């Protein structure tokens, strides 16, 4: 039988079987049943081959006890996308949730994550949540900047269920990973999509207004056929360390067309003169704020590369 890994707890894998799903739909049952989920272990050969099954993997497995729904995974199909941290496979879209207020928008984190999605070669969707708390409507400026670049941006008020339907439409036919600092409303959005408590909601510390991470494991939830949501643990979700500092500009989509205008081959776009990206900033074609965040991310990657040498 074949299926998709939807959860991993201490090397025990929950596998949702597509075969069971088809059989249930023939019987006119609506949506996936808990009985479509098997608890599976992985064959020892994976450890020898240094392959570890992860959430999102498409697998082939053998049922060991149909009544207890237990199984053994014996094949992991080739991954189209693999994220090392958190370990996640075959996602097709990352949904970046940014809080308009409480906590304040972390655009440095957002730009890191957008660059990482470009590096993976998958789609990005930006969700500006808690817009009802933003009395000055500063989120409108954020939305304008990223829509001008070419990203899809949705406004939501998760607590009030506003924008949920528009978000659901954007999730269709994708394996979606939700990313964003703890406390921005990822869990509330997911609960709103399913109209029930699927995840534990994070609390916001009243003292420092920063999120307290509550999600401890990656889970994949099915919305519809071929449409899934991954809820990922907490703060600074996706690591971008795989990106080399010298290549970072290629993953800022509005920078790519300007690199050819740089005078020097291998221009870092930081200290050099006659830089195509800097010229575009002067012309108003590239956001100065986003460029400054690019410089910070570049420096962080560069420092990490230098530490590795030692």
Image (cartoon, rainbow, N blue to C red):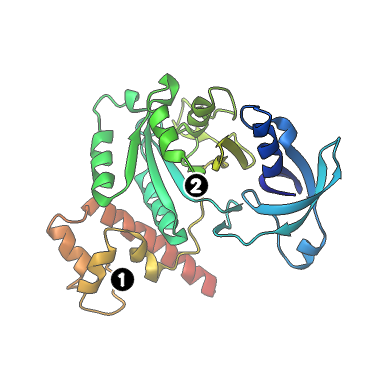
The numbered disc on residue 39 is: none
Q: Residue at x 72, y 36 (%)?
A: 36
Residue topped by disc 1: 268
Residue topped by disc 2: 236
Q: Under tag 2, what secondary structure?
A: loop
Q: Is residue 229 left or right of residue 283?
A: right
Residue 105 percent coordinates (x, y): 36, 38
Q: Residue at x 64, y 41 (%)?
A: 217
Q: How many labels sit on residues?
A: 2
Q: Is residue 138 left or right of residue 102?
A: left
Residue 219 percent coordinates (x, y): 62, 40
Q: Residue at x 50, y 47 (%)?
A: 236
Tag 2–tag 1 contact (CB < 8 Å): no
Question: If you read the primary sequence from the N terminus, does the residue marked by circle 2 or circle 1 appear first?
Answer: 2
Q: Quadrant of residue 261?
A: bottom left
Residue 213 percent coordinates (x, y): 56, 36
Nearer to the camera, 9 or 101: 9
Q: Quadrant of residue 42?
A: bottom right
Q: Residues within 10 Å of mark 1 (few under 14, many from 20)?
A: some
Asked if one can make out residue 204 in the rendered structure from this viewpoint, the answer is no
Asked if one can make out residue 137 in the rendered structure from this viewpoint, the answer is yes
Q: Residue at x 75, y 32 (%)?
A: 35
- Check the picture and name the quadrant holding the C terminus: bottom right
Does 135 sit above or below residue 128? above
């Amino acid at each position: 039988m074949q299926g998709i890994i939807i959860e991993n707890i201490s090397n025990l894998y929950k596998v949702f079987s597509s075969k069971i799903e088809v059989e249930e739909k023939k019987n006119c049952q609506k949506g996936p049943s808990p009985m479509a989920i098997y608890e599976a272990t992985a064959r020892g050969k994976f450890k020898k081959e240094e392959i570890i099954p992860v959430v999102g993997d498409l697998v082939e497995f053998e049922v060991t006890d149909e009544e207890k729904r237990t199984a053994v995974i014996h094949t992991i199909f080739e991954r189209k996308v693999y994220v090392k941290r958190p370990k996640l496979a075959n996602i097709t879209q990352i949904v970046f949730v940014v809080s308009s207020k409480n906590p304040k928008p972390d655009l440095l984190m957002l730009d890191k994550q957008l660059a990482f999605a470009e590096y993976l070669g998958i789609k990005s969707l930006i969700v500006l949540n808690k817009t009802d708390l933003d009395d000055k409507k500063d989120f409108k400026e954020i939305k304008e900047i990223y829509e001008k670049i070419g990203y899809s941006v949705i406004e939501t008020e998760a607590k009030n269920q506003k924008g949920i339907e528009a978000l659901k439409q954007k999730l269709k036919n994708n394996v979606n990973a939700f990313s964003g600092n703890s406390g921005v409303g990822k869990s509330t959005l997911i609960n709103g999509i399913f109209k029930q408590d699927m995840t534990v909601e994070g609390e916001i510390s009243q003292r420092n207004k920063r999120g307290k991470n509550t999600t401890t494991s990656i889970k994949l939830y099915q919305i519809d056929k071929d449409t899934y949501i991954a809820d990922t643990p907490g703060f600074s979700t996706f690591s971008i360390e795989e990106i080399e500092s010298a290549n970072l500009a290629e993953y800022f989509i509005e920078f790519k067309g300007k690199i050819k205008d740089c005078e020097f081959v291998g221009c870092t776009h930081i200290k050099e003169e006659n830089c195509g990206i800097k010229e575009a900033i002067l012309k108003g074609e590239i956001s100065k704020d986003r460029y400054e965040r690019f410089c910070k991310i570049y420096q962080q990657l560069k420092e990490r590369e230098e530490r590795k040498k030692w």
